[in-house]
Amino acid sequence: MPKHFQTIDAARKTLSAIENSAVDELLAGRIGRRDFLRHGSLLGLSLPFLGSLVAAAGFGTQPARAEGKPGGTVRAGIATPGGAIDPVTYYDSGSYQLVFQTAEFLCVTQPDLTLKPVLAESWSPNEDGSVWTFKLRKGVRFHNGEEFKADDVVATFDRLADPAGASNALSVFKGLLSKGGTQKVDDHTVAFHLDAPNGSFPYSVSIDNYNAVILPASYKGDYEKTFEGTGPFRLESYTPKVGATFVRNPDYWGEKALPDRLEFKFYGDVQPRILALQAGEVDLLDAVPLDVSQVVLNSPDITVLRVASTAHRQLHMRCDMAPFTDKRVRQALAFSIDRSKLVDGLCRGMAATGNDSPFAPAFPATDKSIPQRAQAIAKAKQLMEAAGLGGGFDITLTTLRYSDIPGYAQLFQNFTKEIGARIALNIEDQDKYYGKAVFGQSDWLDSPLGITDYAHRSVPNVFLKSPLVSDGPWNAAHFKNPAYDGMVTSYLKALDIGAQRSAASDIQKLLLDETPIIFSYFPDLLVPVRKNVSGLPPIAAGLLLDRVSLG
């Protein structure tokens, strides 16, 4: 037997049936290197072990990344935090970009969507994915000197899953993890007993869920006073509305940070941020919107990191209000859109085309054999006639003033004129649009027609549940379909990648038919840095600055 077959055969004897099914998919050519690494890491297999299997199967190895030089102060320009910073409740990038430097997750996503262990060393599911057991890293201490243990993990997730609290993570944990479901096995082992089986649970306790940083069990609030965590940087100073500085943590459990110091400057708008980068006042920015990207793309002193993202704009149509109670009207609006003009024009080619489901091309389970919906004006007019609306209709589209969304709204308005839809635009500030983010008190959730921004996720679970299941807290389309709900349950509980792919295909076909939400494009994330900056990992979740170097 050739050596590479011996390597694979020996490894397979140590794997579970679910883990071996991923190897089967790889060897049969149904998934590639990237998807195999991603799925294997999800199941808790180490990346070096997975890499050895990939190499033995003839898929090559990932080149090592060059390490930068230590020292210096890295200066970042970010959005002003939205209020008092509390990892339990925050939702804005200005807040979590700071916390990511000082606090850590059980695991983090990599650019290829694999999961890298951080405060967890490994994890594994039981047979049906209803219990996930995490082995925690030993020898880790919080900045205050307290030892990191299972009690901290239990307290963190009980805090986040408490329905009586104000946790922003309830959008992830509702129906997935309840308070009391996180149980200590021993000082360095925790078992998550889920409300329902879930085949991709580790992403819910990763950086994908930006509230899920591990805090001490003793945490009582007032985070801004200490920025307590286990991370590679410690707080030096924090001034609300102005900025923050952090210094290298000399007692960090892992590889010490390269920069001596981080300096964050806060900006209320994106234009001053860009001017500061151009003037050399800062070294890098958090992500900039597509509509201002051309300014930095054309600068000789600036490099823009393009990160393929699953972020998107959901164009919802209320299925419980005329004229959208008839799916033919919803389909007609979707057929009126020229998606190439959105991708190549509005997004300047820096986006992937959407096919009216949350399954972006970047997701491994996406069924790419399903035909892409394209503009078809004649078909759209036929659908309008069949729905009794040959003369068109009048309606208002309500949305928010953010990034490319106003431009998208105007293009949609023009596209739909061709089929008789007379759409008035109501473009609001973000606070007014989202309101209290509950039904009856939110223009987002109550408007008959609207466009909403959704941030990147490494798995589609939140996209599939919160805005689309019958009782979803973000169901702006008021879409209620028991068949869809059942398909999502099947997808979420699947541990086997083949079962995930089958369920995903069923979901994509149903949503193309029902069209409660139009998913036209998935824009790239654009992160501008000055030319002398290296080592920033191109991940869509946020800025991780510990390996950044200034050349």
Image: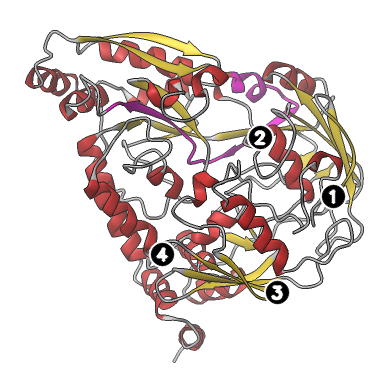
In depth, the one of 295 and 499 nearer the eye is: 499
Which residue is the site of mark 4? 197
> Residue 39 bears which disc, if any?
none
Q: In this view, does 466 lie above or below 530?
A: below
Query: What is the C-alpha distance between the residues marked 1 and 2?
Result: 18 Å
Region in magenta: 292-318
Kindly identify which residue carries mark 3. Answer: 188
Q: Which amino acid does label 4 sit on?
A: Pro
The answer to which of marks 1 and 2 sits earlier in the sequence is 2
* Residue sitting at x 28%, y 53%: 487
Give, as a three-letter code, the residue at label 1. Answer: Phe
Closer to viewer: mark 1 or mark 4: 4
Q: What residue type is labelled 2?
A: Ser
| 98 sits to left or right of 135 | right
Q: Which of marks 1 and 4 is nearer the N terminus?
A: 4
Q: Mark 1 points at which residue?
A: 233
Horizontal and vertical percent position of residue 169: 57, 46
Identify the mark nearer the N-term, 3 or 2: 2
Disc 4 versus disc 3: distance between alpha carbons? 23 Å
Q: Do the residues labelled 1 and 4 touch (CB within 8 Å)?
A: no
- Give the image location of residue 312, x and y in percent: 46, 33
Residue 112 covered by magenta stretch: no
Label 1: element kind: strand
